[in-house]
Image (tube, rainbow, N blue to C red):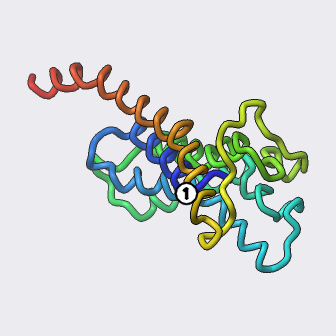
Amino acid sequence: MASVFGHVAVGFTLARLHFREREYWPYWLLASALAFLPDADVIGFKFHVPYASLWGHRGLTHSLLAAAVIALAVTILVRLFTKPGPWRPGFGRLLSLLFLATASHGVLDAMTSGGLGVAFLSPWEQERYFFDFRPIKVSPIGVKNFIGERAWLVLRSELIWVGVPCLLVLLLRTIFTYPATATLRQS
C-alpha cells in the first residue's frame, strides 16, 4: 500500500481542484480522509482474514464499487446535515470529488512495488491488478513497522511520484486560473 502521506496528498489535491475557495476547506479534509479510508480493511489482519480474500487487504474496500457506495453515502449525509448556502456544494460536484478521492486509493496502491494487487472489480471479479508503472515503494502495514530506513524509502518515493506531481498540478491550476478570477472579483 501507499502510505497515509500519499493517499492524503492525492485526496487533498483532488479537493483543491474541485473546490478552490478556502471556504470549502471542510471538503478538502473530507476528500483527504476518504482517500485513505479503504485501508480500514487492515483490521481484518487482527481477525485472521486472509489477505487474498474478498474482505482481505486491497479487496472489496479498494474496489470501484466501494468507492461509489462510500461517495454516494457520504454525499447524501453531507447534503442532509449541511445548511443550504453559497458554500454548500452541488450534489453531483461533491459526489464526483468523493468518488475520485476514494477510488484514488486503489490507483495509488496499484502503483506500488509490493502486495497482491488491487481488486478494482470486486465483488464480481476477484483478480487483483497492478499497473505496469509501479514506482512507489510499498509501505509496511502498521505504524510500528513504519520507522527507520524503510519509512524513509517509502516517503522519498511518494514525495517524488505523488507529492511533486500534486504540487505541480496545484501550481499550474493557480497560474492558469488566478488572473481570470482576480479580474472577475475586481469588477
Residue 100, given in percent of the width and then of the height, sits at 58, 42
Where is 101 relative to 78, above or below? Answer: above
* Crowd around label 1: few <14 · some 14–19 · many ≥20 (10 Å): some
Residue 103, given in percent of the width and then of the height, sits at 64, 45
The residue at the point 21 percent across, 20 percent down is: 179
Where is 2 relative to 161, above or below? Answer: below
Residue 40, given in percent of the width and then of the height, sits at 66, 66
Query: Which residue is denoted by mark 1 in the rendering?
Result: 4
The residue at the point 89 percent across, 62 percent down is: 53
Residue placed farthest to the front in the image?
149
Q: Mark 1 is on which residue type? A: Val
Answer with the quarter of the image where residue 143 lies. bottom right
147 or 182, which lies in front? 147
| Relative horizontal placement of residue 146, taking residue 21 as reference (left or right) | right
The residue at the point 80 percent across, 56 percent down is: 59
The residue at the point 78 percent across, 48 percent down is: 118
Where is 120 relative to 81, above or below? Answer: above
30 or 52, which lies in front? 52
Residue 68, given in percent of the width and then of the height, sits at 66, 49
Q: Quadrant of the C terminus?
A: top left
- What is the secondary structure assignment of the residue under circle 1? helix
Residue placed farthest to the bottom in the image?
47
